[in-house]
Image (cartoon, rainbow, N blue to C red):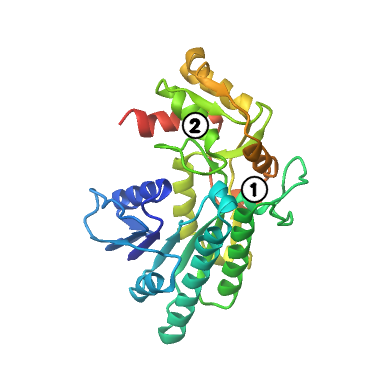
Amino acid sequence: MHIAIIGAAGMVGRKLTTRLATAGELTGRYIERLTLADVVPADAPAAFKGNVEIVAGDFSGEAEIQKLVDARPDVIFHLAAIVSGEAELDFEKGYRINMDGMRHLLEAIRHAHDEDGYRPRLVFTSSIGVYGSPFPASIPDDFHLTPLTSYGTQKAICELLLADYSRRGFVQGVGIRLPTICVRPGKPNKAASGFFSGIIREPLVGVEAILPVPDTVRHWHASPRSAVGFLIHAAEIDTMKLEGRPTLTMPGISATVEEQIDALRNVAGEKATLLIRREPDEMIMRIVASWPERFEATRATALGFRADASFEDIIKAHIEDELQK
């Protein structure tokens, strides 16, 4: 089996690569080859015994995408994206990376399908940013998509493209609307949601964190560990069970910022919470105010997708995976 990961140098991409390399198989088939693609070189997994190709380039463009599809990977994980805050600040870049990249990938696959019947499994990471307020208390799977950000709009367009190319038989598409991934390791990125991780990650190592929104803000979360589990399950699921609706909202944990801080206190003590400094940011508050707070995720749960049990478990997973290495 040949697996390609677009966005392999990102946090989730690195963790997915490690999980696949360690397992050595997917859908019961031995992984013989990994193609790790990103704008910067990804790291080769030490545990992997097969062939690894590391490709650095602009995968929003047709040329690099065509080279990847020419190699006919059996499974493609498409994780690459410009995050929410950056997509809002740089309109053209957001559409080029988030929308054009997906369209070029699907078109390359379509032409390959016409040549030799190529029809890979394509797992695409969408976002709960495709939804826009006003929201019900708990959002059902059939709630309409009315994004209120450029990022959410770009992801919603990609969901429609994935559904249409899957319907036409060019690709076996599965889209997963990820919750906000928390706690993200490493340095903060430009995502408007970055503070959700920052107020946990930084205090756990004795560093001050900035909180730009009120404690009452509620949001939908999943750990990086769960995100990787979602991706692998999406690659293995029977797409016939999706019944023509290939994108699913993933399960997660609904928590207020106050509940996050309480969970941090329970795991790491009061001293950690004192490192959180409140510094309101109007742009971030405006973006976050447009995001949903809780989902039913009935379809995904029925199809076997599983998330964390509590926000305390999310923090413990971060400690185990990142601070106890």
Task: Tell me the residue that label 1 is attached to.
Answer: 297
Q: Is residue 304 visible?
A: yes
Q: Residue at x 48, y 20 (%)?
A: 267
**Rendered position, 266 above or below 89:** above
**Rendered position, 151 above or below 208:** below
Circle 2 Cα neighbour tier, 10 Å, few/some/many (<14 / 14–19 / ≥20): many
Left or right: 3, with 121 as reference point: left
**Rendered position, 283 above or below 119:** above
x then y, percent, for residue 70:
35, 76
Picture quadrant where residue 126 is located: bottom right
x then y, percent, for residue 91:
58, 58
Q: Earlier in the sequence, mark 2 or mark 1?
A: 2
Q: Residue at x 23, y 59 (%)?
A: 50
Disc 2, disc 1: CB below 8 Å? no
What is the secondary structure assignment of the residue under circle 1?
loop
**Kind of residue sitting beneath label 2:** Gly
- Residue 198 is labelled as 2
